[in-house]
Image (cartoon, grey):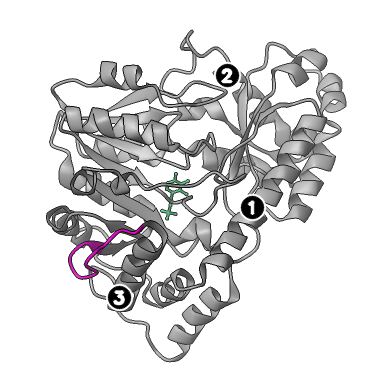
Amino acid sequence: MRRFENTIFDEMTELATRHGAISLGQGFPDDSGPAEVLDAAVAAIGRGDNQYAPGRGLPSLREAIAEHQRSWYGLDLDPDTEVMVSAGATEAMTAAILALVEPGDEVIAFEPTYDCYDGAVTMANGVLRPVRLSAPEYRFDAARLRAAITERTRFLILNSPHNPTGHVFDDQELAELADVVIEHDLFVLTDEVYEHLVFDGHTHTPLSTLPGMADRTLTISSAGKTFSVTGWKIGWLTGPADVITAVGRTKQNMTFTNGTPFQHGVAAGLALPHERIEAIGHTFQERRDLLADGLTSLGFDVHPAQGTYFVTADIGGVLDDAGRSEWDGMEFCRRLPELVGVGAIPAQVFYADPDDPADPRVRHLVRFTCSKSARTITTGLERLAGLRDAIRRSTT
Ligand SMILES: *Cc1c(COP(=O)(O)O)cnc(C)c1O
């Protein structure tokens, strides 16, 4: 694990703290989720429900997850055999990868790639093969996927809505993806933690709802993003019973179980009426608009996210104006906290090779989070308004 040094999130958070910066980098809200969710966890603690939950999760939460998959997506799952609760989507993903990847197996993930997949594949002695989604549209390209498949390819990881790009795979992309998966007899792990944070009428469709995919898809999600409780770390997996059993064996040797009172809170959240959960998506859409419009008016070239907590901006024009064309996103993000008191994440950290000539914009892309309150986003934008002058004044 030597190559997994401190994460960029630790480095940028440390810089932000040192300079009293507003962090628009790491994706977590600065307000908590719905009162019903919080109250149910508090009530569970108050009545003494503070001991180990069953390894597969509280029965009431597993039922709420199965009912959620039925009422939102028409999926029919047995809460006893086809649903398992985990310590966030991260543990779900890691436990699944450790259970399913044999040494030397190849796992395909779309790039830019959320950071936890590579670590888990490496722990399983597998090899992660990135397949590029190109800026600024980030649409899936079946030919690129086919070219990356070898006889060692075991499965692929699909994250949609996609972090960091905000791309939501549409029905055509999903159908083409399913064709390739079936043709090559692959298995898929999906990361759907932003399933309810989709904007502008885009819809999230779980890959497992496509014909022939239910038996070859393990669906992973989490409460953290939907209910603004990222510190709770309650996630889940749904899929074929034999795969859930296999993943249970690794999970049992990782955390075994976690967060009993929080599991009660999440069960209450999943049972909220659809309108309430859709309203959460609308709130994040308003925040996305505030951030994307603000960055655009400051001269950034913003690609509007279709979902998630994030907006990606091309900083090339702003750097040219400020006479610092030689900076890239990493240099920009390292200086931003001191220059104007804002934190952000360079998109290049989500790429194995940020200098691929097929995708020349990567080093100029920066990820900002729109998960913060309107007040925080507004303050961040006010600070960024002074950016060009601050860059020009900076001497080194
Ligand atoms: C935040 C995030 C996760 C982690 O979810 P947890 O439930 O906090 O473990 C997983 N995948 C993506 C794409 C994320 O953005």
Question: In the rendering, at what x and y percent does residue 214 appear?
Answer: 23, 49
Q: Is residue 154 something that shows in the picture?
A: no
Q: Compared with residue 119, is residue 243 higher up or lower down, i.e. above or below? A: below
Nearest the eye: 235 or 349: 235
- Residue 312: tell me if it is visible: yes
Mark whose residue sits in front, 1 or 2: 1
Asked if the residue at tag 3 contacts the one at tag 2, i.e. Cβ–Cβ closer than 8 Å, the answer is no
* Disc number lying in front (3 or 1): 1
The image's mark for residue 128 is none
Name which residue lies at 62% across and 62% down.
279
Q: Between disc 2 and disc 3, whose residue precedes?
A: 3
Q: Residues within 10 Å of mark 1 (few under 14, many from 20)?
A: many
Task: Find the distance from the CA under tag 3 to the CA under tag 1.
Answer: 29 Å
Left/right placement of residue 264 relative to residue 392 reads: left
> Few, some or many C-alpha atoms within 10 Å of disc 3 (few <14, some 14-19, many ≥20)?
many
Amino acid under label 2? Arg
Q: Secondary structure at mark 3?
A: loop
| Amino acid type, mark 3 | Leu
Q: Which residue is mark 3?
A: 58
According to the picture, the residue beneath numbered tag 1 turns out to be: 284
Q: Main secondary structure of the magenta part?
A: loop
Q: Residue at x 65, y 63 (%)?
A: 31
What is the count of numbered marks?
A: 3
What stretch of residues is rendered in magenta? 74-83
State the image coordinates of residue 395 (x, y, percent, origin top left).
81, 18
Q: Quadrant of the N terminus?
A: top left
* Rendering quarter of residue 245: bottom left
Would you place residue 183 above or below residue 69 in this image? above
